[in-house]
Image: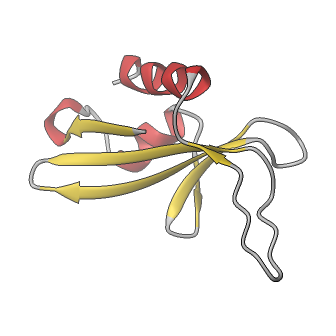
Amino acid sequence: MKILIQKSDLKESLYSFLRKCGYAPFYNSYIKVLASSGYPRFHLYINEENNQYIFNLHLDQKKPSYGKETAHSGEYEGGVIKEEKERIIDLI
């Protein structure tokens, strides 16, 4: 799910804002872990265009499995994702 945020709407650095939202850096993205096992977790990728950030949010239900096939059990839509989107927007 995409979230568009104007850079001018943030009163702090992007990193500080993401920490306030409960996200931690994870390679070239950010995650918010929901259980002690590490999954499920919200996974957030961020792109910058012009004067806005584009957040791409999804929910990883379980660890990806690799082998003969790639399996990714990410949810990109739904009530839980919508609630997290609204929570992030409310924290701006």
Residue under the point 80% across and 58% down:
63
| Rendered view: 60 above or below 21 | below
Q: Position of residue 34 (x, y in %)?
A: 76, 35
Corner quadrant of residue 11:
top left
Residue under the point 9% across and 54% down:
50
Please state if 23 lies on the left or on the right of 68 as rendered. Answer: left
Which of 11/62 is in front? 62
From this viewpoint, which residue is outermost toward the right? 37
Please state if 28 lies on the left or on the right of 2 as rendered. Answer: right
Q: Quadrant of the N terminus?
A: top left
Please state if 90 lies on the left or on the right of 70 as rendered. Answer: left
Q: Position of residue 74 (x, y in %)?
A: 64, 48
Corner quadrant of residue 71:
bottom right
Q: Position of residue 43 (x, y in %)?
A: 58, 49
Residue under the point 80% across and 76% down:
66
Q: Position of residue 72 (x, y in %)?
A: 69, 59
